Amino acid sequence: MARPENVHQARLLRLLREDGARSRAELGDLVQLSRSKLALELDRLATLGLVESGGLAASRGGRRSGIVRIASHLRFVGIDIGATSIDVAVTNGELEVLARLSRPTDVRDGPAAVLDQAMELVGKLRANGTATEIHGAGIGVPGPVSFRDGTPIAPPIMPGWDRFPVREATSQELGCPVLVDNDVNIMALGELHAGLARSVDDFLLVKIGTGIGCGIVVHGEIYRGVSGSAGDIGHIRVNDHGPTCACGNTGCLEAYFSGAALARDALVAAQSGRSAFLAERLAEKGALTAEDVAAAAAMGDALAVRMIREGGRQVGTVLAGLVSFFNPGLVIIAGGVAGLGHRLLAEIRSLVYQRSLPLATGNLPIVLSDLGGTAGVIGAARLISDHVFLPPDLPVCLCSSAARRARAAPSGALRRTL
């Protein structure tokens, strides 16, 4: 599809994507272009099929200004592949979710089987008329990713995925541009676009699910590190003599407190008779998950409450070090295990506020994500739209950071809502 031709067009597209339709007069004020230059760039974007007219704005005392919006035919696909599920959504150009489908899966089945399932879900969404044409797709996977190559690199919980050409294979299948990233990074992008982080340029998103990872956002951009492995906090060692982790090392945070670790410990508790509630659940279901631990804690099961508190302390200890090092403006806790709720959040907050420097935590909100399961698919759509709404030879940070500055959200707006 057509792409913008210069930085001015890219900034205009990002403003329209993030804030919706605006009048030409408002856009001119935000990007500080002359009326003639603005008209030239918007007319060119319309010719390229990227924007369209939305009628006339209310009068500002003179001739009524025309409203401009992202072209209504644009469609992006977000694919969030987790360890145990696939979530697929179609969005419009403003990244509003138009339709969404999910299904359980096992990432250990390998890339061919899992990607076939993802393409099947995309096909169902296209068949219902939501997206006759796809202009780009973003994909998140639960492991380290070479962002440049679009391939997972030695992912601990994804046997058979190492260096599989995910981007190339799905781009050929869908016939559109595709970008691939770690699932935690796309969740962070989702929070940046539609969640509690909309007014924050520097924040951490900690996902606690089957594994544990951290999305790092600096100046409104994902920080991936030199090779793409930044934020892999689940493999920070918290005890030299702890349980063996999926990565092969011992004592990793992920081996202590993740969905898999909670299921393991819950099974031991049920089989040993230390938790009557979990023993009963095991007899009914034949297996246990983190959700069963949450249900046990809600019923006052002392062992389940202790498991959550101990896990929260482990996460809080690691996060306290990250907060002192990075000094974020916000920490978001997300993922399936975050469903343990405020009992878990209280433990994490307590450790972070206790062990990090007061200067770093004095105005630091630590919150649960309010996007639920949509953060990943929105973030994946944001990832590919950043690429599509960019001139071919321009670094993404020049446009998106400028667009965020132009929006000029008031500092402290987030804290007033918490």
Image: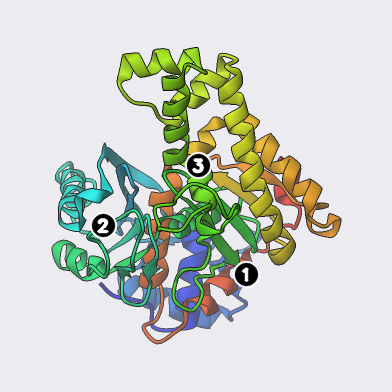
Figure coloring: rainbow
Choose mark 3 or mark 2, whichever is in front. 2
Q: Residue at x 37, y 46 (%)?
A: 97
Give the Cα distance between marks 3 and 2: 29 Å
Residue behind mark 2: 159
Residue behind mark 3: 371
Point out residue 206 in the picture as x, y percentages from the top left corner: 56, 51
Choose mark 2 or mark 1, whichever is in front. 2
Q: State the residue in front, 23 or 418.
A: 418
Element at label 1: loop
Task: Give the residue furthest to the front.
Answer: 241
Point out residue 280 in the picture as x, y percentages from the top left corner: 41, 12
Mark sitting on residue 118: none
Mark sitting on residue 219: 1
- Kind of residue indicated by mark 2: Pro
First of labels 3, 1 by sequence position: 1
Is residue 208 positioned above or below 325 on the image? above
Give the Cα distance between marks 2 and 1: 34 Å
Element at label 3: loop
- Kind of residue indicated by mark 1: His
- Kind of residue indicated by mark 3: Leu
Label 3: how many residues lie within 10 Å, few (<14), some (14-19) or many (20+)? Answer: some
